[in-house]
Image (cartoon, rainbow, N blue to C red):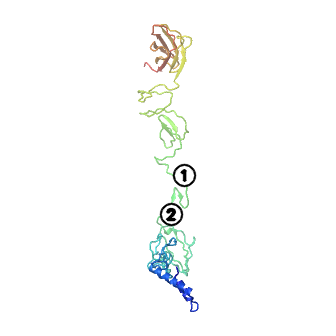
Amino acid sequence: MTTIEEIKTNLNSLNARQIYRDKASGIIDQLTDFVESISTGSSSNIPSNSVVSETTWDITPTAGVLSNYSRGDHTHGTPTSPQGGGTPSDTVFGETTFGINSNAGSGTPYSRGDHTHGTPTNPVNTHESTYNHPTFITQTAITTHAGSTVSVHNFDSSGNAPSQTHDNTKHSVNYVPTTTTVNTKALSTNIVLTPDDLDDTSTTHKFATGVNTGDNSANSSTMYIGTTAHALNRASAAETLAGITLTTPVIGAATGTSLAATGALTSSGTAGIGYTTGAGGTITQATSKSTGVTLNKTCGTVIMNGAALAAATIVTFTVTNSTVAATDVIHVQHDSVGTTGGYTIMPNTPAAGSFKISVRNNTAGSLSEAIVLRFAVIKAVIA
């Protein structure tokens, strides 16, 4: 399709001598085609009355689908500039005090190039550059004040403090004079007090220098527990106490060789009262059921000989035991091995250092069993 611009170009190139019939016929054909395109509504040579806006960022490029041509002076617009522009601010955030926290802000107006936020007032007073600072007072300028009253001294014209001497005797408030003494020792210097400097005539405070005689004298250095004397500076060691009476004591797990009590010994626990490990022992009878045995324990077991014991027959043997007294009570029982209920066990004849055990076969037949007997010595008296 020929455009208007091409037709104009062809016409401008013609003159009277160059016009030939064939050239004129071609131009007429071009004009005819142009008129027909307008009458049939074809838009390939019609200018567009709209434009795609490009006033935002990140628009993707595209070739488009319309056949209308764009006018030579068309524009698509541009996005708003990210720099500059906008509305200038007519206010500013003051920073004329200390302790203001940083803040990104939320306003959209831009700040003017010559704006300021101000600063806090200078907390330090301005010094005059020509000021004559006075000379500090030296250690020899003023003698030490002895009292609470303080004299004021004016600086001279050069800024120096005058040297003055103060009489300590003129200050008499809140101080101890150096002429004061403690037990004849003057306080003009440091003093050290000894026991001799203290009052030794007091009836309640004494120095312990002697040995306690039991009379609570002033020189006592020994104390008594019951009737037993104890030096206060004694070393750690075992001690036997005498003359002590304990009233409802909590003894705990005590270990001793003997305990003499005038009242009852009772136990409310499940362990009861009895012998502990080490008090018992075991002995085996040799030769026959009448052979004696020796076991010096307050409790234990005797393993009898396995010889035959005829029906309804009693056999007796002696147990030598150094723990037994003549007044003690001996308890013996059939402990194990042999026919249960087939024997009668009878302890008897306690003496100093021994007792006897008699065993009877209660069955209708002979028994050859090495039965085991268990015994316990219960200490007793008859007076």
Question: Please, what is the three-letter code of the amino acid marked with disc 1?
Answer: Thr
Residue 206, horizontal then vertical, whole percent? 49, 46
**Looking at the figure, which quarter contains the C terminus?**
top left
Which label sits on residue 194? 1
Residue at the far front in the pictured view: 21
Residue found 51% across the figure and 37% down from its top:
230
Question: Please, what is the three-letter code of the amino acid marked with disc 2?
Answer: Pro
**Secondary structure beneath label 2:** loop
Task: Inspect this view and state whether residue 93 appears.
Answer: no
Mark 2 Cα-neighbour bin, 10 Å: few <14, some 14–19, many ≥20? some
Residue 169, horizontal then vertical, whole percent? 50, 68
Q: Earlier in the sequence, mark 2 or mark 1?
A: 2
**Secondary structure beneath label 1:** loop
Q: Nearer the viewer, residue 281 or 89?
A: 89
Task: Inspect this view and state whether residue 228 appears.
Answer: yes
Mark 2–mark 1 CB contact (< 8 Å) = no
The image shows residue 37, relative to residue 365, as above or below, that is below
Residue 310, horizontal then vertical, whole percent? 49, 7
Dot 2 corresponds to which residue?
177
Which label sits on residue 140? none
CA separation, marks 2 and 1? 22 Å
Residue 316, horizontal then vertical, whole percent? 50, 11
Q: Nearer the viewer, residue 75 or 50?
A: 50
